Each structure stands twice: as C-alpha cells, then as structure tokens.
Amino acid sequence: MSSALKPATGASLSDWLQYLESIHATAIDMGLERVREVAARMNLELPGVKFVVGGTNGKGSTCSMLESILLAAGYKVGLYTSPHLIDFNERARVNGQIASDEALIEQFIAVEAARGETSLTYFEFTTLAILRLFSQSRLDAVVLEVGLGGRLDAVNIIDADCAIVTSVDLDHIEYLGDTREKIGFEKAHIYRAGRPAICADPVPPQSLLDYVEQIGADLWLFSRDYNYSGDRQQWAYGGREQRRSALAYPALRGANQLLNASAALAALESVRDRLPVPQQAVRQGLLQASLPGRFQILPGQPTVILDVAHNPHAAAVLAQNLDNMGFHPYTYAVFGMLNDKDLAGVLAKIGTRIDHWFCAGLPGPRGGSGEHLAERVAAGLPAAPAGAEAPGVSAYADPAQAFAAARERAGENDRIVVFGSFLTVASVLQSLGRKA
C-alpha cells in the first residue's frame, strides 16, 4: 500500500483527488473483490430502479437521455458517468445538478474510513463515494455508466434492474481482448438473470447472446424487440408493447443518436410498471439532453466541432456526421490521441476527410509529443487520390496551441474538428474559457 499521506481535515477536492491517484500501484486493476469488500463494510444499498449502461460507444449519450427523460417525468435521478471533461464533479449528478466539492469530500472521507488496509484504485474509490452519495439522496432511479468493459468494472457490483449494452467494438483491447467476441463477453456481464437486457448493437457478438441465454436474462434485441423509424421532421419508437410516435429528434446531434435514444426508450418500456413515463416527458427529455464533446458544434465561424471519438468505431460515426454537414471548403483536424489507441484504425475511417492535421501532444504516461503523433499520422494516412494534394501534417505542444494555429489558418466558411481524446476536447474547451 502507498505511504501517501491522507488528506488533513479541511483538505480541498483536488487534494483528495491527488491522494487517490497515489494510493494504488496501478491506475487500472480489473477485479471486483476489493471494491465488493469495501462496499459490504459500508452497507451500500441503492434504492430506486438501477440502470447500468455499458458499450464501446454511445454510453454517455444513452445515459444522458435516460436521465433527461426521467427528470422530465418528475423522478429524482442520480447519474454517474466517466471520465469527466474538465471538473471531476461532472461525474456525479443528483437531480440534474453536478455534485458539489463538499458533498464529494464527505463521501471520500467515508470511503477512506471504510477501506482500512484495502487498496483501491482511483476509479474504484470514487465509484464507491458516488454510489454512497446516491444511496443517501432518496432517488427514484440511478443511471450508472460502466467505466471499462463490464465483468470486472467497479460499477458491476450493482445488480442492474435493467442493463443496456450500446455497442460492441474494439477498444481497450489490452484489458478486454482483441476481438468483438471477447469484448462482447466482458460487456454482457452487466446483464442479470431474469431482468431486462437491452442490446442496441445491430450485430451483437455471439458471446453476448450466449451469456444472456446462459444466465436467463430477458433479452431485448434492436430490430427484433424494438426499433425506430423516421423522416426529416420526426421519428417514432416501436417496442414490444409500446409505441411512441411524432417524436422530435434528440438535441444530441449525430447519426447514431436514434439508436441510442431507442435503447433508452426500450429500457424505460422494460421497467414501465415501476417507472411509468408519459409521452410528453419523452419529448421534453430528448430535447433537453445535453452531453459536451459528442459532436458538439460551437456557435460562430469558422464552424468548430468537438468530439471525444478515440477509437475506429467512433471515428466512423464522426466521419458520417461530418459527411452529413453542409459544404465547407477546408476541414482542419486538431488531433490528440493517447499512445495505446488504434491510430491506424482511426485514420482509415476519417483520414480522407481532413485537409490538414494539427497534431497535439498529450500529458501523462499514455500521452506523447505532438512531433511523435505527427510522424505516425503522416506515415499512416491513406494515400491521396490521383491528382489530389496530400493532407498537411504539423505538430504542436498541446491541443490549445494546435487549436490556435488551426483558428489562424481557417477561413470563416471552413470547419475545425477537435477529436481523438477526452483530454484533447477538454484542453480546447478550457482554452476557450468554457465549462463542460
């Protein structure tokens, strides 16, 4: 165990977070034994209906829509998501309000007292603290986003009343495996016997289907048990017994949002006996859901798009969303990506749409210099079509500098897409003086 000094009485939230980063030998340590043991000592019990949301991409959007619809229906709701963009507090919301420093510190003190000699990772410790906050908040429902995978993620100590897997694709392969089948097996473990198991992936891996059958969960498959249809003006959801029509498109932009929205509506249909939701709350909730950094378009010119896409599946969705926008003479990428991500896969999906890459260095052990990233991007870009100019590639110390350079170069009708990591988007948001 670390010899880090426990924060003194009156310590700030940042003091606590620094301490939590130092108390476990590794940042990620998959397994539930330690976190279960401490949760048992804390007598952690969550009242209300528990939704657990996992998947490679689409988790954050689905969680945001579930929370927004339930709030519009008048329920008291807790929302736990990760990672955060700018402030740690973004990870915990109670009734739509971001948790205060004081509320979080109070929970950190309680977890620290309960863990004794048991070592917890930053994520395990903070998950327990936020679950305890929810347990004390008299909530009707909690929406919990899985951090990594499912089977061994700290969130999986909670037995979901309804679990959603949004998509299964390659990411975090060093922890979850290098095929969709292996990753699907990990993600399927948030499902519970006899309870609704929503799967929004249009082509689910066999491993997920087998696990559902093995445990006897109630599988809701996209296109078999629920679906959506739409025209330019509005869309409709059709479930096992519930239809919701004449719905406005979600406030969250992008090609996959109806897939995410219909998964949220299937989840709500599956627990309608416990949490009935009127049609007006669905309409209002979809219009009010917001999630920074997911195909977020900033006001003004040139057009600036922020997207935390950091794996090939998310890059393909981003590419599709860029294609669906109006014409822009030039597209500039402010791009920062962690070393352990699939750069070649991302470039294959989006490379041909970018005219110039402004490559940014990122901090931390998984980060690297802008120069190193620029070399890898230049080497990995698809060949330019005959007669076309190859995209330019330049390097910068950090995303803020890369963004400033892109702003200087872009004309007012051009567009700048900031993507590759939560860290990249957060850095640019902060440089603009914006909160997430």
Image (spheres, helix red, strand yellow):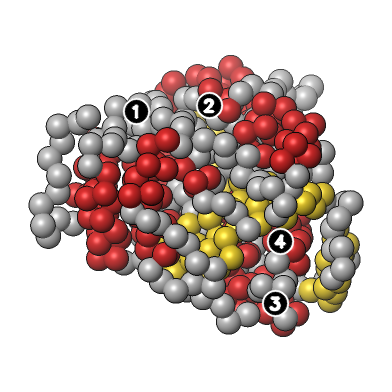
* Residue annotated with mark 4: 267
Q: Which mark is residue 175?
A: 2
Of residues 275 and 414, the one nearer the viewer is 275
How dense is the environment of label 1, judged by Cα within 10 Å: few (below 14), some, or many (20 and up)?
Answer: few
Under mark 2, the amino acid is Tyr
The structure residue drawn at horizontal position 57% and vertical position 52%, both measured from the top left corner, is 159
Q: Residue at x 60, y 54 (%)?
A: 160
State left or right for residue 215 relative to residue 397: right
Tag 3: residue type? Val
Given residues 395 and 115, the one toward you in this image is 115
Q: Amino acid at mark 4?
A: Ala
How far apart in space, not on screen, are marks 2 and 4 (Cα)? 28 Å
Q: CA distance from mark 3 to mark 1?
A: 43 Å
Q: CA distance from mark 3 to mark 2?
A: 38 Å
Q: Name the residue carrying label 3.
A: 277
Q: Which numbered disc, 1 or 2, marks the residue that appears first in the sequence?
A: 1
Picture layout, residue 184 above or below residue 52: above
Q: Specify whether 112 is left or right of 342.
A: left
Query: Quick check: can you spot residue 229?
Result: yes
**Quarter in which the N terminus is drawn:** top left
Kindly indicate whether the residue at mark 4 contacts the one at mark 2 (C-beta within 8 angstroms): no
Q: Which residue, given by chain and number where applicable, does mark 1 sit on?
A: 26
Type of residue at label 1?
Answer: Thr
Q: Earlier in the sequence, mark 3 or mark 1?
A: 1
